[in-house]
Image: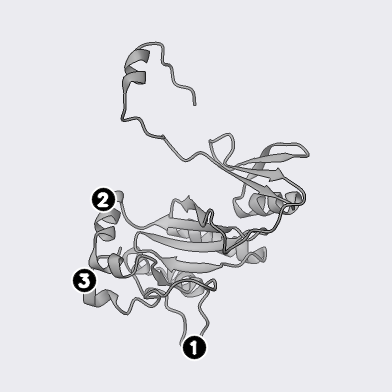
Amino acid sequence: MAISEENGREEILARSDIRPSQLAHIVLRTAQFAVMRDFYLAFLNARVAYENAFASFLRYDEEHHRVVIIAMPGLAPVQPRASGLEHYAFSYASLGGLLATYQRLKALGIRPDWCLNHGFTMSIYYRDPDGNQVETQFDTMACAQADAYMRSPYFDINPIGVDFDPEVLLARYLRGDPMGELIRFGSAPYPDGAPHIRPGGVPDYDFDGALFASTSAPAG
């Protein structure tokens, strides 16, 4: 939204402490234009703000566009072993919103790629049709708490997080378990012997939170 700046323009230009007000949008180039557009329309519950044969501008909130899909026929597939963007994330206002999105996407055949309690977020990752990793998350800490957690001994040991089974977490949420319990490490472990939802090639990490208690780090 444009802001009136009729006065004080010299003072504004002289400031050296100005930072971005938000991360506004992402733009993805693809060789499968319609498939990618339709995926993000479904994934984000978005709508098309504008589209032509070359680009589709998608929005889901007050911003005029959040995701743009650019058609570029002949592109090579995403290369997971090449330098570049690892993933991008979309936040939800509640744990229920995150889990409702998980349920909705599951019904559409869109399955998670990774489910992690990062300590400061509960995060469910997916892959789009081109292979880009996309995170959905719910913040479990205020910024000051997250800062303190990232300075904790446990985060130094395990900055990745602890796995959770989304079906176990969903069942506990529906059962009415307290939020303070649901966002803790180990709140939704996979059943014994069940495979974890996790992409291949990730580095070693304390996926079950076994080292957490010994470090006395807060989480949630």
The kind of residue tagged 2 is Ala
Q: CA distance from mark 1 to mark 3?
A: 28 Å
What's the amino acid at mark 1?
Gly
Q: Is residue 30 above or below residue 168?
A: above
Report the coloring of the rendering: one colour
Residue at position x 50%, y 78% in the image: 196
Report helix, strand or loop for mark 2. helix
Secondary structure under tag 3 reads: loop
The one of 215 and 190 positioned closer to us in this rendering: 215
Q: Tell me: 119 left or right of 125.
A: left
Q: N-terminal of the two: label 1 or label 2?
A: 2
Picture quadrant where residue 54 is located: top right
Within 10 Å of the Cα at label 3, are there few (<14), some (14-19), or many (20+) other Cα atoms? Answer: few
Label 2: few (<14), some or many (≥20) within 10 Å?
few
Please state the horizontal and vertical placement of residue 90, each as a whole percent of the image.
50, 51
Q: In percent of the image, x 57 and y 41: which residue is there? A: 66
Image quadrant containing the C terminus = bottom left
Residue 67 appears at what percent x and percent y? Answer: 60, 44
Q: Tell me residue 193's x, y (percent).
A: 49, 88
Answer above or below: position of 210 versus 126.
below
Query: What's the amino acid at mark 3?
Result: Ser
User: Label 3, on which residue?
Assistant: 216
Give the structural element (helix, strand or loop) at label 1: loop
Q: Residue at x 66, y 47 (%)?
A: 29
Q: Quadrant of residue 43?
A: bottom right
Residue drawn 77% across and 49% down?
A: 73
Q: Classify 10 Å Cα crowding around label 1: few (below 14), some (14-19), many (20 and above).
A: few
Q: Earlier in the sequence, mark 2 or mark 3?
A: 2
Q: Position of residue 189 (x, y in %)?
A: 42, 78
Q: Circle 1 is placed at which residue position? A: 193
Q: Which residue is mark 2?
A: 144
